[in-house]
Image: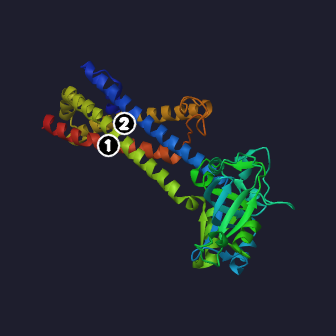
Amino acid sequence: MKLPLYIAWRYLFSKKSHNAINIISGISVCGISLATLAMVCTLSVINGFQEMVEHFFTAFDPELKIISAEGKTFPVTDQRIQAVKALPEVEVFMGTLEEQVMLQYKERQVTAILKGVEDNFEQLTAIDSILYGTGRFVLHDEVADYGIPGAELMTVLGTGVEFIDPIRVYAPRRDRKINVANPANSFVTGRLFSPGVIFAVNQQEYDANYMLASLAFVRKLFNYKDEVTAVELRLHPQADIAQMQKRIQAMLGNGFQVMDRYEQQEDVFRIMKVEKFVSYLFLTFILLIASFNIMGSISMLIIDKKDDALTLRNLGASNPLIGRIFLFEGWLISAVGAVTGIIAGLALCLLQQHFGIIKLGNGESSFVIDTYPVSVEPADVILVAITVLAIGFLAIRYPVRYFCRRLLP
């Protein structure tokens, strides 16, 4: 094994009788290197966007969310739910109530989701990081109830960040059918004032559809007592979220579903995973095309070194041993291309992380971020290295066998 590898290493850096072989070998290494660099950078950018989206949802979604597997609401006083609340790993426990309502501000009307939360919502999530305005997060006081709309919902209603007139909230009566002759009698109304802030998750699902209010206000509006649509949890930093999710699910049984942040936004993260997988497939196809240069380089090298191969044969080398020389030669080209490509890709990602070389758009602040986000994951680097080496192995195996059989009878 050492002899074929040694000779292949010498062939890789030694001059050939035809200068074109050196040029093709260099092109092969560059092609593999560029394709590898593209794979590392592309996958890292997709990781960066995914982490950015995760950060947005982290400010609004809880670490764990309990919903009913059957029906919409459930009593928060359920013994199983209270047992979860008593767990020492649970740092923040909060019931929430979401219902569809119609909002009216002056002459504008829009349907939205009114989410009732408790005063400790700031402790449950990082909502403060996505609040905009001169006010503060407050849901009620002795005088009035307050509502915090999403940024796009504010735009549709035309309220502005600090609205003086209250937003009227219309909720259907749960115990009555809509009276066509007098539809106004089929709705309960409430008023929400502005605390001087709005929230912006930078996700249309929330910004265009949600308004936050106090849990007591939403319960009163829909004539609920102790019912909630979900229980949201924040765990102690030392607690393992995955293990706690399984433990709580076992405590609650099949009547409830416990979801982490990924499961709460399953559609979004599934799409991002599919995008990453499709990008990987396309880049692998480009890498496969680049590997054809290796086939041409090895084929010309076998022809150029035919005399050397015959000399080795006369010295007692077998055809399989000679074939391994050129096989190792192709692998070395792939390995050199993979190593240089990975190093260059990691260097480019590092520069992008620290200096933001590549901008989004024309450099103006029309996007959530100014530069492409980058996050390098070791698993992706390992996957790229394995992919490059595997394709290099498959690309040269057949031509080496074919030419060795034709030139070394």
The residue indicated by pointer 2 is 334
Dot 1 falls on a residue whose secondary structure is helix
- The answer to which quarter of the image holds residue 321 is top left
The residue indicated by pointer 1 is 393
User: Horizontal and vertical percent for residue 408?
Assistant: 15, 36
- The answer to which quarter of the image holds residue 329 is top left
Task: Decide if residue 15 is on the left or right side of residue 239.
Answer: left
Q: Is residue 408 visible?
A: yes
* Residue nearer the viewer, 9 or 105: 105
User: Horizontal and vertical percent for residue 122?
Assistant: 76, 56
Check disc 1 and give the amino acid type.
Answer: Phe
| On screen, residue 147 above or below 68 | above
* Residue nearer the viewer, 207 or 346: 207
- Mark 2 or mark 1, which has the lower sequence index? 2
User: Distance between the Cα atoms at labels 2 and 1?
Assistant: 8 Å
Q: Residue at x 62, y 67 (%)?
A: 245
State yes or no: discs 2 and 1 in contact (Cβ < 8 Å). Answer: yes
Task: Decide if residue 101 is on the left or right side of residue 48.
Answer: right
User: Horizontal and vertical percent for residue 371?
Assistant: 58, 34
Q: Is residue 318 visible?
A: no
* Residue nearer the viewer, 173 or 23: 173
User: Horizontal and vertical percent for residue 117?
Assistant: 73, 63
Query: Label 2 crowding class (10 Å Cα cut-off): few <14, some 14-19, many 20+?
Result: many
View extreme (bottom): residue:
79
Dot 2 falls on a residue whose secondary structure is helix
Query: Label 1 crowding class (10 Å Cα cut-off): few <14, some 14-19, many 20+?
Result: some
* Residue nearer the viewer, 14 or 111: 111
Q: Quadrant of the N terminus?
A: top left
- The answer to which quarter of the image holds residue 184 is bottom right
